[in-house]
């Protein structure tokens, strides 16, 4: 059992994130591989269905298959991605505190509360990014309904009237300002909610309680949390650029159409990216969650008191935790 918890600097949290990721790679990547594997299978099925429609010269069928496949894929990303984040968060909490953890145990604890975690993520994303979506939607509606019919954006159309040109320029400038403002707002709100998933999984809180808990815990460290998120984003974009850049270039040269073998290879590389990058976010934010509890609530002292036998209940498993989680912890092995 880990009893040396203490406040960590940003550099120490980054070092600890790398250490946990490296020493528990099979555990954390294994949890994320379930999410990546489901997306891989669905993507391969979609590619096969599209090729079958093309072979039978069914243009309408190709469109239907593509649309249905896209909807199913996004639903899978939302559901399986949310579950994988929660499972990785729960596993990181265990290994950080020196408790046994395994892929199966993490999913057994998380799956019964899948609806809770998905609802939490829906609320936080909606609160943070709905203004950005609203700005995009309003600008797109303006273009489609009011500006496009005038021929302003149509090649070889007659020159637009000065009035219409002014409306387009003014709306575009307003869109850029509103977009920047909504993105800044989304980032700030995301930082407020960044510890909601760890609070929900570790303390078994309901979504709104987890959000309030995150707002309270994240105060004073949102700048550090932003730096962690930025670093993880840079790693993700870099890895995505390395694995997907070639396919993007080829797709542009061939008007968005890739050979079948290349599409399949692209999906396998995307599987590796999803598997390797996913645990970074969960590991870093979970460590920040525990660090804030140490700083604000003396969680390290609680753990030491429990280790010394001075308290009856383990702080990690307080009255808000379910008995099923206790049972899973007792029966879990280190890795599966």
Image (cartoon, rainbow, N blue to C red):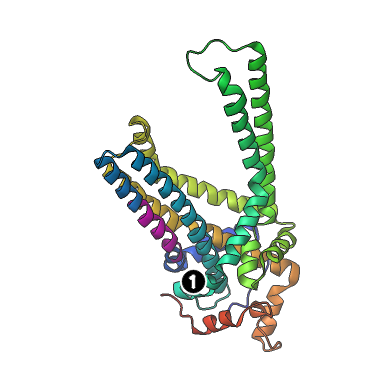
Residue 12 visible within the image: no
The percent coordinates of residue 267 (x first, y second) are 36, 50
Is 43 inside the magenta-drawn segment?
A: yes
Badge 1 local density, few (<14 within 10 Å), some, or many (20+)? some
Residue picked out by circle 1: 107
The percent coordinates of residue 164 (x first, y second) are 64, 16
Q: Toward which corner of the image does residue 247 lie, by quadrant?
A: top left
* Residue numbers of the magenta segment: 31-44
Badge 1 marks a residue whose secondary structure is helix
Is 105 inside the magenta-drawn segment?
A: no
- Residue drawn at x 67%, y 89% is 309
Main secondary structure of the magenta stretch: helix
- Residue drawn at x 68%, y 32% is 177
Vertical position of residue 27 compared to residue 169: above or below? below
Q: Toward which corner of the image does residue 310 lie, by quadrant?
A: bottom right
On the rendered structure, is 25 left or right of 234?
Answer: left
Residue sitting nearer the eye, 280 or 108: 108
Vertical position of residue 93 compared to residue 268: above or below? below
């Amino acid at each position: 059992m880990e009893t040396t918890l203490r406040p960590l600097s940003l550099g120490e949290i980054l070092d600890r994130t790398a250490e946990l990721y490296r020493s528990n790679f099979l555990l954390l990547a294994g949890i994320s591989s379930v999410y990546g594997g489901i997306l891989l299978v669905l993507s391969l099925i979609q590619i096969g269905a599209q090729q079958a429609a093309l072979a039978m010269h069914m243009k309408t069928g190709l469109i239907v298959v593509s649309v249905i496949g896209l909807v199913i894929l996004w639903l899978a990303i939302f559901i399986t991605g949310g579950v994988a984040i929660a499972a990785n968060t729960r596993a990181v909490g265990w290994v950080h505190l020196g408790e046994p953890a395994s892929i199966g145990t993490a999913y057994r604890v998380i799956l019964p509360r899948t609806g809770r975690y998905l609802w939490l993520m829906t609320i936080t994303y909606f609160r943070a990014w709905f203004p950005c979506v609203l700005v995009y939607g309003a600008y797109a509606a303006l273009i489609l309904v009011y500006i496009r019919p005038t021929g302003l954006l149509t090649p070889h159309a007659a020159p637009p009237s000065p009035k219409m040109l002014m409306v387009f320029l003014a709306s575009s400038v307003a869109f850029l300002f509103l977009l920047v403002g909504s993105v800044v707002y989304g980032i700030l709100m995301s930082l407020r909610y960044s510890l909601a998933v760890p609070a929900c999984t570790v303390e078994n809180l309901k979504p709104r309680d987890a959000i309030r808990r995150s707002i309270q815990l994240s105060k004073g460290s949102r700048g550090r949390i932003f730096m962690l998120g930025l670093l993880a984003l840079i790693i993700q974009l870099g890895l995505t650029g390395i694995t997907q850049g070639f396919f993007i270039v080829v797709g542009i040269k061939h008007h968005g159409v890739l050979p079948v073998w290349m599409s399949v290879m692209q999906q396998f590389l995307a599987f590796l990216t999803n598997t390797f990058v996913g645990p970074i976010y969960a590991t870093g934010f979970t460590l920040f969650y525990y660090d804030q509890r140490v700083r604000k609530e003396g969680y390290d002292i609680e753990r030491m008191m429990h280790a010394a036998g001075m308290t009856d209940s383990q702080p990690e498993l307080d009255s808000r935790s379910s008995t099923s989680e206790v049972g899973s912890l007792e029966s879990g092995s280190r890795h599966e």
